[in-house]
Amino acid sequence: MTLSRPLGALAAATLLFLSACGGGGDAPRGAVVSASVVGSLSTAQIDEGTQHSGLQPLSGTAQCGVVAHQVRYVTRDPRGREAEATTGVLVPSGASAACSGARPVMLYAHGTSLDSRKNMASLADDETQLVLAMFAAQGYIVVAPNYLGYAGSSQNWHPYLNAEAQAVDMIDGLRAARRALQVAGGPQPTGPLFITGYSQGGHVAMATHRTLQRDHAGEFTVTASGPMAGPYNLAEFGRLINEAQLINAGAVLFTPLLLTSYQRSYGDVYTSPAQAYNPAYAATIESLLPSTSSIETLVMQSRLPNDPTFTVKLFQNSTHPDGLILDSYRQDYVTNPNNGFRRAMERNTLLGWTPTRPVAMCSGAQDPTVFFAINQGAMLADLNSRLPAQMQALGFDLEDRGTLPAGTVGDLIYGGFQNAKTAAGTSAVARYHSELVPPFCTALIRGFFQQFLGPQ
């Protein structure tokens, strides 16, 4: 059980800060609205959890306990209007030097969630448990924004894969966490700054690194970034899905998130939902995801197609009259360069920028959800076409031993991943992206970051 208790001094300081800034109407980006401690775990509790889950060979034993904070902060929506979002902040605790003082910061971007209650401050969340064990329990302060549209945000929709908007949200969450912890005392987020994230969060992490370098170099110095399994090349991804009809697993769920995000961000994806969607779904689809209802419930209510993999019924056709997207809209995407959805996918493609700080990526070549070659493969080739030899980005592929670190670490990662796939049996494909890849890639990215910290 976790108990929530307000940080009295922080709450008072927050009220004074916002009052001085004019209240809720013109608060600066990253202003703290509220903050509280929502739970904590001892090193023994963390070790018990990682031993039970089988994560401990990758995570190691906990060096620190962890205290979970939730911070509500001011940010901006995709059109520059004031909005509020929340972030989880996982803070190491303990008397050792690895758990106190100035700590390295892990700015973490979470993966796609269909649950609007998704909260990275929750110690019951599987993704929180992973980053807690891999980073916070090893001495990092983890700042993990929940994004607009989640965990009590003032905005009732999510700017899914909107590179600029999500980077703003992440940066403001980092600002707010720094302010909150300065008031709260204890370990401080003043050490090296790392960025990572998985799946959607891989895209967000890459976009955030780009924006910090481009717009905030005087405020933040990125030490290194490690995006994982992200859809960096949305333009080619969209072409494959719509033109070649090579549809990724889960596309029936991801597409409404994308269409709603880009329509509300840019206003030109369609004239009405009926232009893009099967009439059976058009009336309610814009407000459908993320949701507090389960996907099973939404399917039972006929608000989404009944499709076990949420893949084959993306497009309506003679075989699937209950498909989600009208074939006429798909054809317009393919043939019309001014199709608003197509332009949004191009706009949010991340190829073409040149980092000045080290980057490593990680994924698995058999990923059925975020296709490897057109995303990590293309992103890696694009970056390294411009980066000098001493700055070449790294690309870890869990299916290719040659891309992994030499020696026992690489053997452990490669062998462990192959064993995990074998143990998953017939469910390996379904679990590949969401369950099998994350712990192994997270371990690799932590190892990549470790070289910038030196002996601890």
Image (cartoon, rainbow, N blue to C red):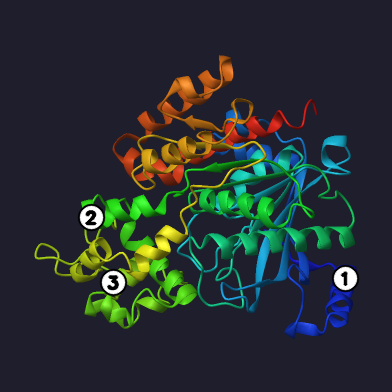
The residue to which callout 1 is attached is 8
The x and y percentages for residue 435 are: 45, 43
- Quadrant in which the N terminus is drawn: bottom right
Q: Nearer the viewer, residue 351 or 107?
A: 351
- Residue 351: percent from left, percent from top: 48, 47
Disc 1 versus disc 3: distance between alpha carbons?
45 Å
Of discs 1 and 2, which sits in the foreground?
2
Q: At numbered mark 3, what does the secondary structure look like: helix, strand or loop? A: helix
Residue at 70% of width from left, 64% of height from top?
A: 172
Q: Nearer the viewer, residue 128 or 145?
A: 145
The residue that mark 3 highlights is: 300
Residue at image coords 73%, 31%: 452
Mark 1 or mark 2, which has the lower sequence index?
1
User: What residue type is disc 1 on?
Assistant: Gly
Q: Is residue 308 visible?
A: no
Q: Give the crowd class for mark 3: few <14, some 14-19, many >=20 residues within 10 Å.
A: few
Q: Disc 2 designates what residue?
A: 243
